[in-house]
């Protein structure tokens, strides 16, 4: 069994002199990221490996969330995760070391949410339908999708095979 955590970066400032890649978190983003990290810790969503986009807002989201998380994951900051497509994210995830039971990817819209939808299976119960409908409607900043897979190697990660066990939005934490 493998667990995948897909976290969209927290709310960022609209503009930055350094361009989009260097945009930092807004005050709301700096508030939401540690709260999401705390909830992840409470629910046992603690990654062994983290793949994080190299953008300022994703790095800052990770730094603020990790202070609330237990464990000491292996972290990779990847330029190729910046604004990556769902297929590219899937390819990166297939390369996660099999020793990691849980992996966290921190990235951007729309690729991250498209990856979550791509990986989620057809819902089999009402609660799963509601989670997937909510995710499809809007994957907000600092939103977290949690998918479980009945696989033993990350290379076996395939579309339509993940059970969407949780979808947490910052507004759910209020």
Image (cartoon, rainbow, N blue to C red):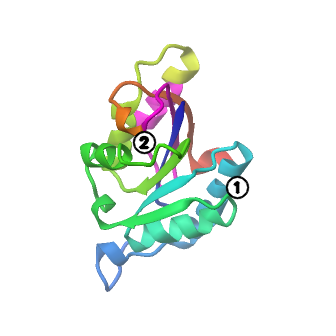
Which element is circle 1 on?
A: helix
| Marks 2 and 1 close (CB-CB < 8 Å) | no
Q: Which of marks 2 and 1 is nearer the N terminus?
A: 1
Residue visible at 46% across and 28% down in the picture: 151
Q: Over which residues does the magenta segment extend? A: 130-153
112 over 72 or under it: above or below: above
Residue 110 drawn at (x, y percent): 31, 49
Q: Mark 1 points at which residue?
A: 38
Residue that mark 2 sits on: 138
Residue at 74% over, 47% down: 42
- Label 2 packing within 10 angstroms: few (<14), some (14-19), many (20+): few
Q: Does dot 2 land on a helix, a strand or a loop?
A: loop
Considering the image in quadrants, where does the N terminus appear?
Answer: top right
Judged from this view, the residue extending furthest toward the right is 42
Q: Can residue 110 be seen in this view?
A: no
Residue occupying the point 52% across, 35% down: 2
Where does the image place residue 123, in percent across and percent down from the top left? 46, 18
Is residue 77 positioned above or below 107 on the image?
below
Q: Nearer the viewer, residue 123 or 87?
A: 87
Q: In this view, does 148 lie to the left or right of 111?
A: right
């Amino acid at each position: 069994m493998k667990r995948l955590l897909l976290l969209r970066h927290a709310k960022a400032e609209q503009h930055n002199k350094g361009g989009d890649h260097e945009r930092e978190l807004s005050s709301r983003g700096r508030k939401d990221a540690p709260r999401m990290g705390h909830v992840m810790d409470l629910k046992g969503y603690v990654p062994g490996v983290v793949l994080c986009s190299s953008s300022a807002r994703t790095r800052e989201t990770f730094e603020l969330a990790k202070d609330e998380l237990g464990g000491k994951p292996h972290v990779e900051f990847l330029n190729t995760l910046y604004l990556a497509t769902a297929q590219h994210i899937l390819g990166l995830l297939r390369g996660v070391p099999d020793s990691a039971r849980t992996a966290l990817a921190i990235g951007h819209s729309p690729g991250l949410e498209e990856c979550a939808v791509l990986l989620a299976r057809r819902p089999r119960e009402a609660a799963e339908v509601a989670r997937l409908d909510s995710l499809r409607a809007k994957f907000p900043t600092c939103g977290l999708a949690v998918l479980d897979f009945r696989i033993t190697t990350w290379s076996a990660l395939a579309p339509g095979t993940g059970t969407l066990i949780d979808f947490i939005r910052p507004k759910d934490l209020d």
